[in-house]
Amino acid sequence: MATRIALVGIGKIALDQHVPALAASPDWQLAATISRHGQVPGIPAFTYFATFLADCPDVPVVSLCLPPVPRFDYAEAALKAGRHVMLEKPPGATLAEVHELEALAKAKGLTLYATWHSRMAHAVAPAKAWLQDKTVQKAHITWREDVRKWHPGQDWVFQPGGMGVFDPGINALSILTEILPRPVHLTKARLEFPENRQTPIAAQLTFSGNVTADFDWRQQGPQTWDIEVATDKGHLALRMGGNVLEIDGRPVAGENTIMGEYPALYARMADLLRQGTSDVDLSPMVHVADALTLGERITAAAFDF
């Protein structure tokens, strides 16, 4: 029997990814939405989260698609009301607040899932398996996309807590922390802040283990989501945000689409509920926090949508 779930924050990512994933899943029934502006046709809609919690005690799971800054209050309220919680990436605005949510979920015997959708890309698992017995000699991430395409008019991404280019960049870091045989740590960062914005629009990162990354939110035309890894036994490349795997220049696994990621997230949440456990890995978010701590700040040209 499908589990009833509520979706909070009906914006672009919810409509493009979450709603189709839920509609196609035998594990879930979308029972309610909570949003100040958006709705899903045919689904009961609430404007206020407190009203939903009071009126829908039979909906045991909440999936939060809000921007990071307001997310903690909603997650805390849901957990205190006895609901299991699924967090869109990044799981919060700060590491400390997510640790607090994790402790609250544990105390109440509830499931908390900090999702990383790019880890569910088609080629990430085979890439991880291929690297397990290899020595990584060098790795580089190139993650360049057009913020106007993916966040049209969404000024919150450039406000404090919005993460700027790390909103997509953390997707690359979620893959990196998943596939590397050994962990790395940040040693240097260069962050480009538009003169009229509070978060970076580009970043260049250097990690231990000869690992580097180039993030940029100003790329027009074709988008670039690549990770290249040189090893003692060959060269690995992940294309299309982790969905296509190449070994020594030859495609060997994956599919040229990003549409499998969110269905896999919801399948994972269903498994966590059945197991009665949580999954709260914050390693990608740690790298972002370290970059904002260590980063050299460079002023770039003003940016407007």
Image (cartoon, rainbow, N blue to C red):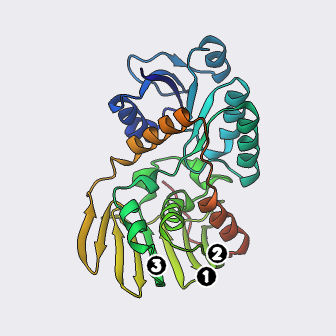
Tag 3 residue? 140
Q: Earlier in the sequence, mark 2 or mark 1?
A: 2
Which mark is in front, 3 or 1?
Answer: 1
Q: Position of residue 242 (x, y in %)?
A: 38, 62
Badge 2 local density, few (<14 within 10 Å), some, or many (20+)?
Answer: some
Tag 1 residue? 208
The quadrant where residue 264 appears: top left
Q: CB of mark 2 within 8 Å of CB of mark 1? A: yes
Q: Position of residue 62 (x, y in %)?
A: 57, 29
Residue 232 in sight in this render:
yes
Q: Earlier in the sequence, mark 3 or mark 1?
A: 3
Q: Residue furthest top?
A: 55
Badge 3 local density, few (<14 within 10 Å), some, or many (20+)?
Answer: many
Tag 2 residue? 185
For the N terminus, give its image quadrant: top left
What is the number of the mark on residue 105? none
The quadrant where residue 191 appears: bottom right
Q: Secondary structure at mark 3?
A: strand
Badge 1 local density, few (<14 within 10 Å), some, or many (20+)?
Answer: few
Q: Earlier in the sequence, mark 3 or mark 2?
A: 3
Q: Residue at x 61, y 42 (%)?
A: 278
Q: Residue at x 31, y 67 (%)?
A: 245
Q: Secondary structure at mark 1?
A: loop
For the residues labelled 2 and 1, the Cα–Cα distance comes to 5 Å
Q: Position of residue 40 (x, y in %)?
A: 41, 24
Q: What amino acid does circle 2 point to?
A: His
**How many marks are shown on the rendered structure?**
3
Q: Residue at x 41, y 88 (%)?
A: 232
Q: What amino acid does circle 3 point to?
A: His
Is residue 176 found left or right of 90 in the rendered image?
Answer: left
The quadrant where residue 207 appears: bottom right
